[in-house]
Image (cartoon, rainbow, N blue to C red):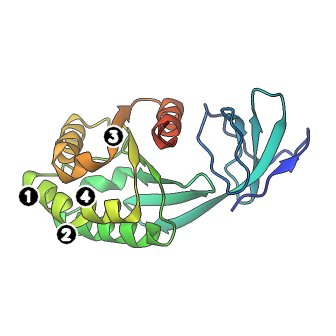
């Protein structure tokens, strides 16, 4: 869990990535105003800087954990944002159906202990087409487990491969896939901004 600290300065990490607003959770420290992510530092134990509309600057620590890697995909978990990011690799063009199934099982095993609320599948370089039989398999074997883990929303970065992208959308249109919110984006920052909204608690 991240630790909140008040202050105006933070040591600069070696690498900085600027993002649009991202929903952040922290037990025992929630403000009524919307938190705005100013900078996200995706280094281990790096600091995230927030500013809310009261002018208070807040910091908490985000840990970028690489929880799975293979020639086909890389999986990161960002705590305490409770977002998992899977980055598909160019090598996915040579995946067999059996390897795809193995990758999905390994992905599930990797995120099981963390129970993310949101997913950011980066399929930009995915070059594998999910054919109808695999789409059915996904809905029977994978999506129910996503739901049991508590996954609420997925923001996809669109594949450059049109056939891969169509097959992704067809898979997500199946009944089980519709149990959580899904959108498609060209820009990572827009995807993260949408995840913020999708993960906000329902208003009474």
Specify which label sits upstream in the sequence, 4 or 3. Answer: 4
In this picture, residue 14 sits left or right of residue 24: right
Q: Nearer the viewer, residue 142 or 185?
A: 142
Q: Which residue is mark 3?
A: 182
Are the two marked residues, 2 and 4, in contact with CB atoms closer than 8 angstroms? no
Q: Secondary structure at mark 4?
A: helix
The mark closer to the camera, 4 or 3, is 3
Where is residue 110 drawn, in percent x and y?
Answer: 45, 70
Q: CA distance from mark 2 to mark 4?
A: 11 Å
Q: Residue at x 25, y 58 (%)?
A: 94
Q: Which residue is mark 4?
A: 94
Q: Which residue is mark 2?
A: 98
Are the two marked residues, 3 and 2, in contact with CB atoms closer than 8 angstroms? no
* Residue reaching furthest to the front: 204
Where is residue 67 drawn, in percent x and y?
Answer: 52, 67
Q: Residues within 10 Å of mark 3 (few under 14, many from 20)?
A: some
Specify which label sits upstream in the sequence, 3 or 2. Answer: 2
Q: CA distance from mark 3 to mark 2?
A: 26 Å
Q: Which residue is mark 1?
A: 133
Are the two marked residues, 2 and 1, in contact with CB atoms closer than 8 angstroms? no
In this picture, residue 186 sits left or right of residue 40: left
Q: Secondary structure at mark 3?
A: strand
Specify which label sits upstream in the sequence, 4 or 1. Answer: 4
Q: Residue at x 80, y 52 (%)?
A: 4
Q: CA distance from mark 4 to mark 3?
A: 27 Å
Where is residue 163 drawn, in percent x and y?
Answer: 18, 39
Q: Secondary structure at mark 1?
A: helix
The mark closer to the camera, 1 or 3, is 3
């Amino acid at each position: 869990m991240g630790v909140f600290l008040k202050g105006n300065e933070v040591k600069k990490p070696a690498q900085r990535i600027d993002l649009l607003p991202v929903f952040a959770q922290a037990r025992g420290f929630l403000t009524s105003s919307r938190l705005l992510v100013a900078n996200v530092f995706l280094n281990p134990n790096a600091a995230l800087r927030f500013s809310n509309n009261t002018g208070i600057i807040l910091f908490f620590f985000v840990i970028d954990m690489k929880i799975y890697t293979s020639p086909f995909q890389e999986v990161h978990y960002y705590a305490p944002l409770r977002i998992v990011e899977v980055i598909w690799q160019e090598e996915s063009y040579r995946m067999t159906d059996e390897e795809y199934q193995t990758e999905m099982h390994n992905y599930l095993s990797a995120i099981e202990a963390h129970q993310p609320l949101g997913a950011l599948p980066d399929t930009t370089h995915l070059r594998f087409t999910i054919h109808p039989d695999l789409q059915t398999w996904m809905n029977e074997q994978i999506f129910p487990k996503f739901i049991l883990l508590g996954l609420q929303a997925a923001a996809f970065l669109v594949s450059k491969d049109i056939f891969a992208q169509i097959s992704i959308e067809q898979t997500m249109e199946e009944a089980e896939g519709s149990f959580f919110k899904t959108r498609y984006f060209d820009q990572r920052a827009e995807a993260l901004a949408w995840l913020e909204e999708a993960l906000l608690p329902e208003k009474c």
